[in-house]
Image (tube, grey):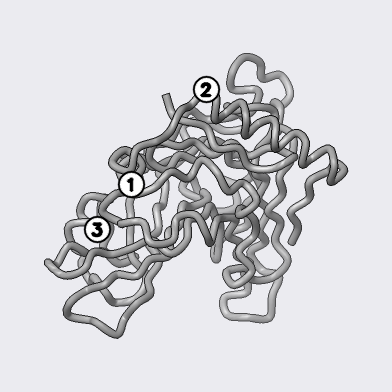
Amino acid sequence: MSTRFGTTRGKALAVTAAAAIIAAALCGPATAAEDGGGDHRRGADHWGVITRNTIGSPVADLRNGPFGSFGVTGPSASPPYGRGSLGIEVADASTSLTPPSEKVDFGNEVDFFGDPVQGLRRVGFHVFQTGENVAYGGPENMPNIRFEIDPNLTALPADNYSTLVWVPDAAPVTNRWSGFLDATSTGYWFLTGNEVPACNQAARCSLEEVQDALDDGGAGATVLTAAVGKGRDHMWIGAVDGLRINQNVYDFEVDGVRALRAR
């Protein structure tokens, strides 16, 4: 498991500070209504591997590229934002556990805490999928977006934990960068546990259907963490960039995570 930054601490801090100043100057403040309850353009230092949710020795690596694959030119030959991305590598049979596959989450345990699940309106990312990944686990062998949440269901007052997971459809292209994959209109969502039997891993839902199921008239469900992750299922080696959560796009770069206002 690694989160390598590939530069000196002084240089990284200087670049991150400059990026934050530019973003603040160009983007302006996000409103609570548009951003699901808060402005999360700050807090770049809060992104990293979520150690609680990591199994085995996977990689979640802020890296340059990928550029290509070989022979690929044009916009799909480089990350959609900047020059970097979040590289993810997980193995399918490398632990002594059951199942033996690895798992990793790269996310933020601070800045989304307490946000309303009902406030999630725009979610998705860009992915670098390979033909090898399809061979390992099929066309839908893809990374996920995961929100750990407190369901706050009136019928289950003592149950304060579940994970809201987006499973993408098959990537539209391989061996190059995809366009934006919209989690509000493609793929499916589910909740771990038994909080909402109609929206579990065997009963697939849209984001709107999950939100409706959690809206039972009591205190609303709240976000605990937000992450991009993979596992535990098939081997996957690829990359993600441009994670969008409401009005912000999170640009993964070698020197850190930059928050940009979505256009």
Q: Real-space Cα distance between discs 2 and 1?
A: 21 Å
Q: Position of residue 95 (x, y in %)?
A: 69, 75
Give the number of the disc on residue 206: none
Q: Residue, x 42% and y 23% (percent of image)?
A: 263
Q: Percent x, y for residue 21? A: 62, 30
The front one of 60 and 257 is: 257
Q: For the point 52% across and 59% down, which residue is it?
A: 110
Q: Which residue is mark 2?
A: 26
Residue hosting label 3 = 210
Judged from the image, the secondary structure of the residue bearing numbered disc 2 is helix
Q: Residue at x 36, y 42 (%)?
A: 35
Of the pair 196 and 27, the residue shown nearer to us: 27
C-alpha gap between disc 2 and disc 3: 35 Å
Q: Nearer the viewer, mark 2 or mark 3?
A: 2
Q: Residue at x 72, y 49 (%)?
A: 61
Disc number lying in front (3 or 1): 1
Image x and y of residue 226, in percent: 48, 56
Q: Which residue is mark 1?
A: 36
Q: Which residue in the rendered view is the most extreme toward the top? A: 74
Q: Earlier in the sequence, mark 2 or mark 1?
A: 2
Picture layout, residue 246 above or below residue 235: above
